[in-house]
Image: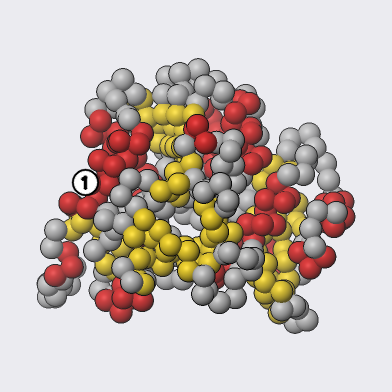
Amino acid sequence: MADAPPPERPLLRGAALVVFTSGSTGRPKGVVLGHDRFAAKLDALQELLRLSPSDTVVLPLQLIFIFGLWVALLSLRAGARLALVGKFSPATLRARLGDATVLATVPSMLRTLFTDGETQASALRAILTGGEGLGAQLSGEIARRLPGAGVFDLYGLTETGSCDFCLQPGDGTAGRGSIGRTTPGVHYRIAADTAGVPGAGAGELLVRSPFGMLGYLDNPELTAEALRDGYFRTGDVARQRPDGFVEIVGRIKEIISRGGNKIAPAEIEMMLSAHPAVAQVLCAGVPDPRLGEALHVAVVLKPGCSASPDELRNWCKGQTERFKVPDAIHVVDALPTGPTGKALRAGVRDLAQARM
C-alpha cells in the first residue's frame, strides 16, 4: 500500500499484539504487548479464574478490546469451548446462555440484558466483568437473577496487560464499591501529591506490573510520560479503604470543576444508583459560562418505574452536599456507549449540549 516499507521498529521485536486504546479521552494510542509478558499474564489469570475444558465461555465483547482478547486466548489455552456472540443485543446474548458456564461482559451489557425480560442461565458459574464500574445496584441484581454465578469484577488497563485488580466472588459483599485487591504479580501506589483531586487520601493510582506494555507504538515520549518510578500512571483517582480494598473515585481528566469545587463523577453515579427507580447512571461535566463546568447526569429508569428530573434532583439534595447536586438530569432510554460497549461520558456532554 506504500511505495517504501515502513522503518524498522525495535519496539516490535518480540511483540505479540498492537492494541489501540478506545481513545475516549484523546487520540487512540497503539499499545505494544510482548509475547512473553502477555503469555505470563494469561498464566496469572488462569491461576485466578481456573477455566477448564468443561467450560463454555460466552463472549459478546469485540476482539479489538483487550478484555475480549485475553478472554478469548485464555479460553483457547484452557481447552474450553469459546462461543463468540455477534453484534450484541439482549436476544443474541440470551440465545447463547443456555449452556454457558462463564460469561465475559461489560456492566452496560448486563444492565441492558436485565431490562429486557428474564434470563435463564442455569449452568453459569462465573461472570467476568470489567471495563467500567459495576455498581452496587447491578451487583445486587446479578445476585438476585443469577444466584449461581460468582462475579469476578476486574480492573486493569491495556497498557498494564489488563486485570491488575479483582474483586472476587467471596469478597463481593464486603468489598462492594471497590475494585478489590491486586492480582498475582501486580503492585500499586496511590500518589498523594496528585493536584486537583477531591477527597482525603485520594490520589492517582500507579500500577507496576511485569506484564505491562513494551511501549506506545512510535511514541517514546508518551511512553516515558506514562511512567513514574517504574509505575504506570493510570489516570484514575483512587483511595485505599480501611478494609484494604481499593476504590476508584474517578479519572483525573474527568474530575469536574464546578464553581471551583472538585467533583468526582463516580461519586455522583454511586449516589444516584441507590435511588429505587434508577437502573443506570452516567455523569459528566459540561462547559458552563457561570460555573466553568455544570454537573449533568444521564439516567435510565427501571422498567415500570417513573421519576422526573426534578424529583431526582430533589432526592439528591437529601443525600449529598449542595454543590454536588446535579445541575441537570436527563432521563434517557439508554446510556451512550463507545465502540467497545463501555459507557461514554463524552456522550453525556453531547446530549446535554444538544438539549440546551
The residue that disc 1 covers is 39
Query: Which residue does the image show at 41% across and 24% down from the upper left?
Result: 101
Q: Nearer the viewer, residue 213 or 347?
A: 213
Quadrant that contains the C terminus? bottom right
Q: Nearer the viewer, residue 306 or 235?
A: 235
Count of numbered circles in the view: 1
Q: Amino acid at mark 1?
A: Ala
In the rendered image, residue 122, in percent from the top left (x then y), is placed at 50, 17
Q: Most extreme residue toward the front, as rendered?
A: 242
Seen in the picture, residue 65 relative to 55 is either above or below; the reply is below
Quadrant that contains the N terminus? bottom left
In the rendered image, residue 326, in percent from the top left (x then y), is placed at 77, 62
In the rendered image, residue 18, in percent from the top left (x then y), is placed at 26, 59
Say left or right for 47 vs 126.
Answer: left
Query: Which residue does the image show at 76% across and 64% down from the upper left?
Result: 324
Say left or right for 337 vs 48.
Answer: right
Report helix, strand or loop for mark 1: helix
Query: Which residue does the image show at 45% across and 46% down from the upper left?
Result: 181
Seen in the picture, residue 13 relative to 112 is either above or below; the reply is below
Seen in the picture, residue 85 relative to 22 is either above or below; the reply is above
From this viewpoint, is residue 339 visible? yes
Query: Which residue does the image show at 59% across and 31% down from the upper left?
Result: 142
In the rendered image, residue 257, in percent from the top left (x then y), is placed at 67, 74
From this viewpoint, is residue 346 visible? no
